[in-house]
Every structure is written in C-alpha cells, then in structure tokens.
Image: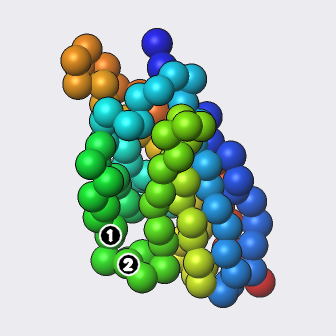
Amino acid sequence: QVQLVESGGGLVQPGRSLRLSCAASESIFRDEVVHWYRQAPGKQRELVAYMTRFGSTKYADSVKGRFVISRDNAKNTVYLQMNNLKPEDTAVYYCHTLQTDTDSDYWGQGIQVTVSS
C-alpha cells in the first residue's frame, strides 16, 4: 500500500508563490504517471498537471506558464511549483498516481491552498 503525503500549502497573497510537495512511501513516481488535481468549493475536481514516467508534462490551460511539476526520484517526491498565484487557484490540491502492475489507485490526503489579500 503506497502512501502519498502532501505538504507546502497555506495562505498566500495574490502574485506570490508556493511549492507543494507529494512524498510517496515507496519508489513509485519514477515508474508511473503522477497527477496534481485540485478541487475548489462547489466545483468538480480538476486536473492541474501531470508528469509521465518519461518526464513529459502537461498543464491545464488555467495554470500554463505559472505552474511547474517536477520530480525527485531519489526522494520519492513530486513537486508543484505555483507562481503568480491568483485567487481562483484557491482549492484543495491532491496528488495522485496509478500503479499499473496492480491497477491500484493512490491519492494524497489533500492540502489547502488559499490565495487572498
């Protein structure tokens, strides 16, 4: 059973930056795709960014050019660097991965990001 633990959220003013971390309990990110999702109050969960095991990345249009997903295989950790934050980025952020050989779905507990002046 893989555990994912997010950290790095909080309250930040518009225009500032935050870096979210997602630490896995075992080495999984180097072999699987990893996603960052977010869910704002009253809205559906949306995909923010993902990185494949080959290192390819893709971003939602709403965050393109502001957010960067990266991975440190040695630390079993994936990051989401969020720059120039906007109030509409306020949400609970989740990391997710799917272990393909077991077809097991893993989610982090979620972490709150609030962008407000």
| Mark 2 in CB contact with mark 1 (< 8 angstroms) | yes
Is residue 105 positioned above or below 56 on the image?
above
| Quarter of image, res 20 | bottom right
Find the distance from the CA under tag 2 to the CA under tag 1: 6 Å
Q: Mark 1 points at which residue?
A: 60
Task: Please name the residue shown 59% across and 37% down the image.
Answer: 75
Mark 2: amino acid: Lys
Is residue 61 positioned above or below 41 on the image?
below
| Quarter of image, res 89 | bottom right
Q: Where is residue 82 in the image (x, y as percent from the top left)?
A: 57, 70
Is residue 47 positioned above or below 12 on the image?
above
Task: Please name the residue shown 47% across and 68% down the image.
Answer: 68
Task: Please name the residue shown 53% across and 46% down the image.
Answer: 72
* Viewer-proximal residue among 109 and 72: 72
* Viewer-proximal residue among 71 and 38: 71
Lateral position of residue 4 relative to residue 114, left or right: left
Q: Position of residue 107 (x, y in %)?
A: 46, 33
* Viewer-proximal residue among 104 and 91: 104
What sort of colour scheme is used for the picture?
rainbow
Q: Where is residue 81 in the image (x, y as percent from the top left)?
A: 57, 66
Q: Mark 2 points at which residue?
A: 64
Q: Is mark 1 on a helix, strand or loop?
A: loop
